Amino acid sequence: MILRTIEFKILVFSPKKPIFKKTSDFLGMFSKKLYIKDVNRFLDIYQFTHFRKFLEEYQATRAKVDSHFTRTEICNLLGLEKSRSYFADVLRGKKVSPRMVQKFIEILELDKKEAKYFETLVELDQAKSDAARNAAMQEVLKLHPNPQHILNEDAYEYYSHWYNSALFAILDAMDVGDDMAPVQKRIFPKVPLGKLKDSLALLERLGLARKNENGFWKPTKESISSGPYNNADLIKQYQLQCFELSKQALMTPPKQPTVMSTLTFSISSEAYKKLEAELQEFKAKARRIIGEDKEKADGVYQMNIHLFSNLD
C-alpha cells in the first residue's frame, strides 16, 4: 500500500506533465484493472461455446465487483449512448457486426488468442450455412486449449453428417464389403460414393466397424450415444439434419413403411411433465426393443420425436 502511494505521488506531482489529473482518475483505473483481473480469474472464456452466454455471465460476474458495469454502461462503452437496449438485444439474438465484435473484445480486454476464440464463437453463432457453421466449429476446436473439453474431434466428424450413423446401422442390415456401390444405390437420401467410403473409414478409425470372417464390415456395438460428447451445438446440428431427413421422407413417395403424425394440444404444466416422462420411458422401451431384437435386421429406420411449445 505504501509503495502504491509513493508511485502515485511521483506520477501526479512530477514536474513533467502529469498522467492523472485527479486522484479518482488513478483509483478508477487501478480499480478497473482489479475488477477485470477478478473476472478473468473466475470466468474462463474457454468454458463457453456460446458467445452470448459468455457475454451475459461476464457482465453479471463483473457487476458483482464493479457495480457500475451495468448493461447500460456496456452500451456506453460500445459508443451507443442512445441505445441502452443494444446489449440486451445481443443477448436475445441480435446480430453483431465485425466492428462491434472488436469493441466487445476491447471492453472484455481479451488477449490475442482469447480474442480470436471470441470472434470464432460469433462466427459459429451467426453462420448462414451448414458449411460455414461446420468450418467455424472446426476452428473452435483448433483454438480451444483443451478441445476434449468440448468434444472428441472424431466424434465431431461422426455427428457432422447424418449418413455416418445411417451407415453404422446399414452395416448391420446389409452385407457390405469394400465396394460401397450397393449401399450408395439403396441409401435414402442419396449420398455420393466418395463420402460413403470416407464414412466407412471413419467408422473403422473410431472402432465402430470391422470386417468379420466373411469379409463384410459389421458394427462393433449395438448402438451409439453422444455421451460425454453431447455438445449442444454439435448435437443441435446433427438433429437439424435428421429433421431434414423427415422432411424429405414426407415429400417422397414411400417405398418402405412410413409413419408420419402430428398432434397439437393444450395441457397444464403438470400434464406436460407427465407427458415428458412418458416420452422418456418410451425412448427407453424403444432402446430395449432394438437391443433385444435377435432377428437379422432387414431395414434401417429413423425416428424423431418432437415436443415443443407454440407459446413463448
Image (spheres, grey):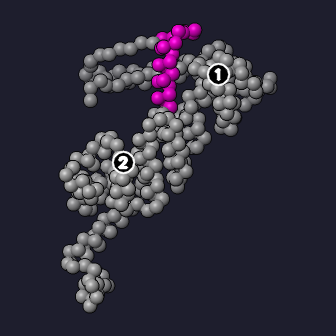
Q: Can see residue 169?
A: no
Counting from the top left corner in percent of width and height, residue 206 is at 65, 37
Q: In this view, does 182 lie above or below 155?
A: above
Secondary structure beneath dot 1 equals helix
Displayed quadrant of residue 20? bottom left
State which mark lies toward you, 1 or 2.
Answer: 2
Q: Is residue 57 magenta?
A: no
Secondary structure beneath dot 2 equals loop
Q: Which residue is drawn at 21% across and 55% down?
A: 81
For marks 1 and 2, the one nearer the N-term is: 2
Q: Which residue is drawn at 57% across and 9% down?
A: 256
Displayed quadrant of residue 263? top left
Q: Residue at x 41, y 42 (%)?
A: 125
Give me the C-alpha separation between circle 1 and circle 2.
44 Å
Q: In this view, does 256 lie above or below 187?
A: above
Q: Name the side, left or right, on which 215 lies relative to 154.
A: right
Residue on which the image places disc 1:
170
Residue on which the image places disc 2:
97
Q: Is residue 45 above or below residue 294?
A: below
Per the rendered image, the range of residues in magenta is: 238-259
Position of the C terminus by quadrant: top left
Q: Name the side, left or right, on which 138 lies relative to 128.
A: right
Q: Nearer the viewer, residue 68 or 275?
A: 68
Q: Main secondary structure of the magenta part?
A: helix
Displayed quadrant of residue 207? top right
Position of the N terminus by quadrant: bottom left
Counting from the top left corner in percent of width and height, residue 32 is at 29, 67
